[in-house]
Amino acid sequence: MREFAEQEITLPTGPYEGRRFNCLRQPFTRLLLDEEDRRDPVTGYLYWRRRNVTGPQQCGKSLLGFVIPILYHLFEVQETVVCGVPSLDTVSDKWFEDLLPVIERTRYRELLPLRGGGSRGGRVSSVRLRNGATLRFMTGGGSDKARASFTSRVLVVTETDDFAKAAETSLEADKLKQLEGRTKAYKDRAVVYQECTVTTKENPTWCYYEQGSASRILTPCPHCAAWVEMEREQLVGWQDAESEEAARLAAFWACPACGRQITEGERLDMNRRALLLHRGQEVTPEGKIVGSLPPTRTLGFRWSGFHNLFTDAAELAAEEWQGKNAADQENAEKALRQFRWCLPFQPELVEGAPLDPKIVAKRKDNLPHKLLPADTEKFVIGVDIGKWQSWYLCLCFRANKRIHIPDYGVIEVHSDALAEEVAILQALREFRETVEEGWPVEGISGNRVPDAVWIDAGHLPGVIHQFCRESGTFPGGRWMACIGRGASQVQKMKYNAPARMTNTIRRIGDRWFISRVREYQSWLVTIDADHYKLRLQHGLQIPPTDDAGKPQPGAITLYDPGTDKMMRDMHNKLSRHFASEQRQQMMEADKGLVETWVKHGPNHWLDCGMLGSAAGNYLGFRLAPSGEGSEPKAMTVMDWLKSRNSNAYHRR
Ligand SMILES: [Zn+2]
C-alpha cells in the first residue's frame, strides 16, 4: 500500500499541493502503510482485519485512513469497496471533495464513469468504474434496503464515532456492525478500515484503539538515546508565559527520559527513525522490537502532535496558551485534546460516578426532621405541581455555606373529588397555612417562615398565577410562579438569558430572570433548569466535610431519620428522585459536546430542589465570598470544580 501511495497519489491540497505523496514528509505515514501490508504467516492474507486509525486534525488523516485505502482497493486490487459514511448528506462531499480531486490527479482518472453516479453532475451513491470495480456508499441510516444484499471484501468507514450516535436514535442496534455484515461472506479475507478524530473514551474510535493493538510510536532521544513516547506533557516551557507570543518563544520539546531540550531539527530526525510498537511489545536500546503481537486482529493506530510535522512546538504552545486563557476552558481543552493531541476528552462534570441514590440517602446531618440549623441564612421551598399529588422540598442556605434539607413531602391533591384546577388551588391554600406556621429553628424558640416559596407553573399556569396573586406576589416577595427551561424539561426549550431589562423583564440574575405576565397580572421566574439541577446534584456529591472535618461549601445534607423506618424509606425515595434524571454528554466527531438528559423514574423532588436552588441564588446565597465593592458573583459548579482541579489542565 505504501508503494501504491508513493507512486500513484499526488496531493490535492495542503502545504505540498501538487507534489507526490511521500512518507518522508510525515514519517508516521510510513509506519501505518507498512503495517497495513503485514501478512498472516500461515494464510498469507492481510494480518489486520480491522484498521482503526486516529490522529490530530489537518495532517492527512483522511487521506491516509480513508482516501488511500479506497483508491488502493479500487484501482490496484481492482475490487469493489463499500464506503461507510454516518449520514447521506455527507456522501456527495466525500466524493466530490475528498476522493474525486485525488483520483483526477492520478492515471486512473481514465477509469472514472462518464455519466451516471459519480460523474460530474451525477447523483452519488454508487460509482461504477470502468475497470469493473464499484464504490458503493452506505450510511448508518435504516432505510437503505439495497444494503442487505450488497457484499464486498473491503469496507472503509469515515467519521467512525458518528455511527455511535446514529445507533442510539434508531431501532436497529449497531450501524457499524451492520455495515461490517456486508463483508461477512469473505470471512478472514475481509478488511475493515475506519478513521476518525478521537472523541470520548466510550466511543468506537478510542475503544477499538485500546482493545485493538493500542500501538505506540517510539522515537529515539538525540541526547540519551532512550526510546521515548512523545506526548502532550513533553511540550514545555510555555506554561508561565505572559502572552501568546511569549508562549510561542518559550516553548520546546523535552525528553521524558533525560529532560533535555529537543530542537525541531532533532524532532524531524527522531520521527524519521520512529518505531511502531504494539501492545505488550518492548524495544531494546539498539532499536530491536521484542515481544509477540497482542491477541487481536484490530490494528489500533494513533499519532499525536509531536508526530505531526505540519506543526511545531511554537505553534502548539500558542494554541495551548490560548486554551489556558480562553473564556470557555472546557471547550478549548476539548478542542486541543481532540484536534491537536489525539486524546479522548472526558467532560469534568460527568467525570466520576453518576449520582448514587444509596449514597445520597446517607448524607445526613445530625439535625432531626423539620428542625432548621441555627445558622440558616435563607430558608426556601420549591413546589412541583401534579394532578393527584404535589411535592415540596425545603432548603436551608447556611452561614457555613452548606445547604440542608430539613423537610420535604407530598401535598395531596383531591382531583378525584374536584375539578383538577379547583383541587390544586385548594391543596396550595392548605399548604400555605402550613408554610405560614413556619418551621422550628435549632436553639431558638419560635418558628421561621420561609423567605421564598417558588412554585412550578408549567402545569396549569392560570391556577398557579391565581394562587400566587391571592397570596401576594411581587419580586422580592415570598410566593413566585416559575418555569424551568432546558434540555431536562419536557418542552426542551433552551434557556435564553435576556440581554437587558425591558418593560416586561424586570430582573436578571444568574441563570434566572423575572418577567411581568400581563395575562395573569402576575410575575414569573424563568430558570435555567439544567444548570440548577446540575448544581443540586453536585451538591449531593460534595462530601459534607473535608478531611479536617470542616464543612464543605455547596455540600447538601439531609435531616437525620434516626431509626424510623418510614423516614429512612422516604430518604431512599428522595434519593431516587434526585438521581432519576442525569445529564449525559456525548462527543460527536466535528460537532463537539452534545448534551441530553436521561430520565428513568419520577423526579419531582429534583424539580423542587432546582426551584429552591435558584431561589437561594435569587436571595443572595453564594458559595464564594464576593470581592469588596464588587457585585456579588455567583460561583458556578464549573468554577468550583475548576478551582479544585487547577492542574487538571496539564493532566493527560
Ligand atoms: Zn533523552
Image: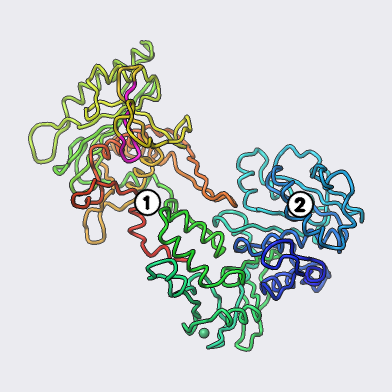
Q: Nearer the viewer, residue 613 or 250?
A: 250
- Mark 2 element type: strand
Amino acid at circle 2: Cys
- Residue at horizontal 68 percent and vertical 66 percent from the top: 299
Q: Is mark 2 within 8 Å of ligand 1?
A: no
Amino acid at circle 1: Met
Q: Is mark 1 within 8 Å of ligand 1?
A: no
Colouring: rainbow
Task: Give the left or right position of residue 15, taking residue 236 as reference.
Answer: right
Q: Main secondary structure of the magenta part?
A: strand
Q: Residue 628: which numbered mark, if any?
A: none
Quadrant location of the N terminus in the rendered image: bottom right
Task: Give the left or right position of residue 471, taking residue 324 as reference.
Answer: left
- Residue at horizontal 27 percent and vertical 51 percent from the top: 544
Task: Give the left or right position of residue 66, taking residue 151 as reference.
Answer: left
Residue 370, image x, y percentages? 20, 35
Q: Quadrant of residue 445?
A: top left
Q: Quadrant of residue 410?
A: top left
Question: Circle 2 is placed at which residue position?
Answer: 83
Tell me which segment is drawn in magenta.
Answer: 508-517
Looking at the picture, does residue 475 appear above or below residue 40? above
Question: Dot 2: few (<14), some (14–19), or many (≥20) neighbours within 10 Å?
Answer: many
Looking at the picture, does residue 506 appear above or below residue 144? above
Residue 321, image x, y percentages? 44, 65
Residue that extends furthest to the left in the rendered view of this protein? 445
Question: Circle 1 is placed at which residue position?
Answer: 638
Q: Nearer the viewer, residue 135 or 577?
A: 135
